[in-house]
Image (cartoon, rainbow, N blue to C red):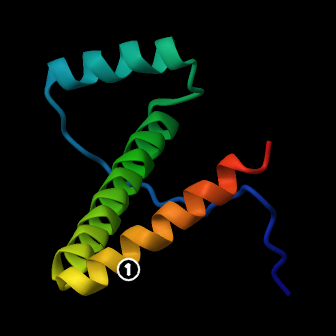
Amino acid sequence: MIIAMAGITRKARRTFSLSRESLDYLEKLQKAKRHRSISSLLDELIRRQQEANDMRAISASISSYYDSLNEEQAAEQRAWGQFAESQWSNED
C-alpha cells in the first residue's frame, strides 16, 4: 500500500542545456528568491506560467461568451451585474 504525503510530488530527472546567460539569470533569481535549488525555482516559474496561460484562456472564454450575446441578453447581464453591485454596497 502506497501512502501519499501532502506536498510531496514525484519528480523526474531530466538534463537540459542552457546558455550561460540563462544559467546566470537562474542562479541570480534563485539567490534573490531564496530557493533551495534551481530545480525548485524552475518548477515555480513553470507553475506560474501555466497559471498565467490558464487565466488568459479563462479570460478569452469569458470574453467570447459575452461577445456572443445579443443586445437583449447583454442588457440582462448588465442588469444582473448592477443588482449584484447594489447588494454588495448595502452590506455596510
- Helix or strand or loop: what does disc 1 sit on? helix
At label 1, counting other C-alpha atoms closer than 10 Å, the crowd grade (few under 14, some 14-19, many 20 or more) is few
Q: Indicate whether 87 appears above or below 52.
A: below
- Residue 44, how many percent across, how many down? 47, 42
Q: Indicate whether 90 appears above or below 79.
A: above
Task: Identify the residue under disc 1.
Answer: 76
Q: Indicate whether 67 appears above or below 35.
A: below
Q: Quadrant of the C terminus?
A: top right
Q: Indicate whether 20 appears above or below 16.
A: above
Residue 72, located in which quarter of the rendered image?
Answer: bottom left
Q: Is residue 12 left or right of residue 5?
A: left
Q: Quadrant of the N terminus?
A: bottom right
- Residue 12, how many percent across, how many down? 47, 61
- Residue 3, how many percent across, how many down? 84, 76
Seen at 44% across and 51% down, the residue is: 47
Q: How many marks?
A: 1
Seen at 25% across and 74% down, the residue is: 66
Q: Is residue 12 left or right of residue 26?
A: right
Report the front residue among 26 and 14.
26
Report the front residue among 47 and 70.
70
Seen at 48% across and 12% down, the residue is: 32
Seen at 56% across and 66% down, the residue is: 83
Kind of residue sitting beneath label 1: Glu
Report the front residue among 7 and 60.
60
- Residue 10, how many percent across, how many down? 60, 64
Residue 21, located in which quarter of the rendered image?
Answer: top left
Report the front residue among 21 and 81.
81
Q: Is residue 37 left or right of residue 72?
A: right
